[in-house]
Amino acid sequence: MNFLLILLLFGFFTAHQAARLRSLNGIRVNETTEFPYQASFQLNRTHFCGAVLITDQHALTAAHCVQPIVDEGKSDFALSIEVGEKILGSGQSYAVERISYHKDFVRNSHPLFMPNDIAVIRLAKRVELSEKVLPIDLPGPNDETPENATIITSGYGSAKRIQGFLSPMLRKTKSFALDSEECCKSRLHQVCDLTINHICGRVNRTRGTCVGDSGGPAAKGDRSVLIGIISGSGTWCGNGLPDIYTKVSHYIPYIRGELYREDKSVHPHVIIAPEKIELLEKVPRWYTRERILRYFALNLIQESIETEIINAPNSPINHDRMKKMFELGLKVQSFFDWMDKVIANKHKA
């Protein structure tokens, strides 16, 4: 039995076992219509950041997700967003045609408090709207979020305490707005570079955003208005420290300028060449399906390792078992890394 078949069988097994995975990054979304504005920002049909639909042809994401692509001035890979489903790889994909990020974005700062961390994506064609795919309303210019207001975030980020593998299923979590002083106090002796352009969200321990959620939506409690873009995070997710979001209301002029006057934009941007847009059609859908199996498999492996560590005070750690789980995880990771290279070399212009 070859390695690919073993991997597929293991993936199907883990899909059936998915309900056992601990929810450290919120709870799974039951209905796709609950977050019709949610988008997955993808490279070669592989999720790397969240995004949020604001028109039928535009989405917002975090500047730190796109800065390397924009600064290079081109993309050798197929960039797209996926919308319309709660399971990665099951939705509708739309090619990205233009990306812009705010000119005052500063990446070389504290990773939790990156200033002006916002970007605008324009799609090559309009998305097909339905009850599963709908833009979310923007806030008014300079609208403020009241203290203790409920904030709902969603995304495909890691559902583990340590930054780990992506969740193949959309998850949601709840936070509550904190004022700047309380937000910084909650960080004790850690750096707090919060600005007026940030929103701070208080979360319970074992809840909150994690790697892979960046760029996704932070919405008003009733999910009617977008108030933030998920921005920085620490290396240890679900540690009880506040989540940080870019305050969308302070960037309405930038957003409107990119939507309606992009030809006069003063912000860094890149237009994806038509031949690169066509690459999306060359990346097979089965590749995305196998990525989903990868997420299920690696999540289960990480779950087993975490369980071994958590249970350590009550029973000795089975080092041989942990070693085998690590080795299996590395094999799965290596296989998909190899597949990434094969597809990238095949379709790179």
Image (cartoon, rainbow, N blue to C red):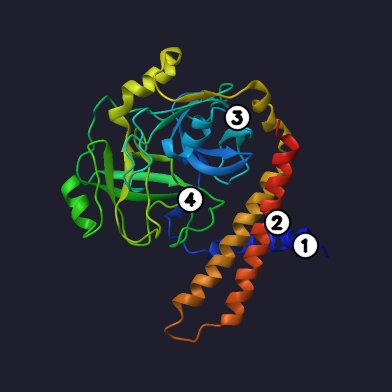
Residue under the point 74% across and 45% down: 342
Does 28 sit left or right of 4 as displayed? left
What label does residue 157 carry, if any? Answer: 4
Question: Which quadrant, please, contains the C terminus?
Answer: top right
- Of 20 and 115, nearer the camera is 115
Say which label, 3 or 4, has the lower sequence index. 3
Tell me how far mark 1 sits from mark 4, CA to CA: 27 Å
Query: In the image, residue 171 lies at what x, y percent?
Result: 47, 50
Please state which amino acid type lies under the numbered disc 1: Phe
Count all numbered tags in the image, as a single digit. Answer: 4
Disc 1 vs disc 2: Cβ atoms closer than 8 Å?
yes
Callout 2, which amino acid?
A: Phe
Q: Earlier in the sequence, mark 2 or mark 4?
A: 4
Between 303 and 131, the one lying in front of the other is: 303
Labels 3 & 4 near each other (Cβ < 8 A)? no
Tag 1 residue: 3
Q: Is residue 108 above or below residue 264?
A: below
Could you give the CA–CA distance between mark 3 and mark 2, rounded to whole angstroms? Answer: 27 Å
Location of mark 2 (residue) = 335
Q: Residue sitting at 42 percent across and 55 percent down?
A: 26
Badge 1 or badge 2: first in the primary sequence: 1
* Kind of residue at badge 4: Gly
Q: Which mark is residue 94?
A: 3
Foreground mark, 3 or 2, reads 2
For the N terminus, the quadrant is bottom right
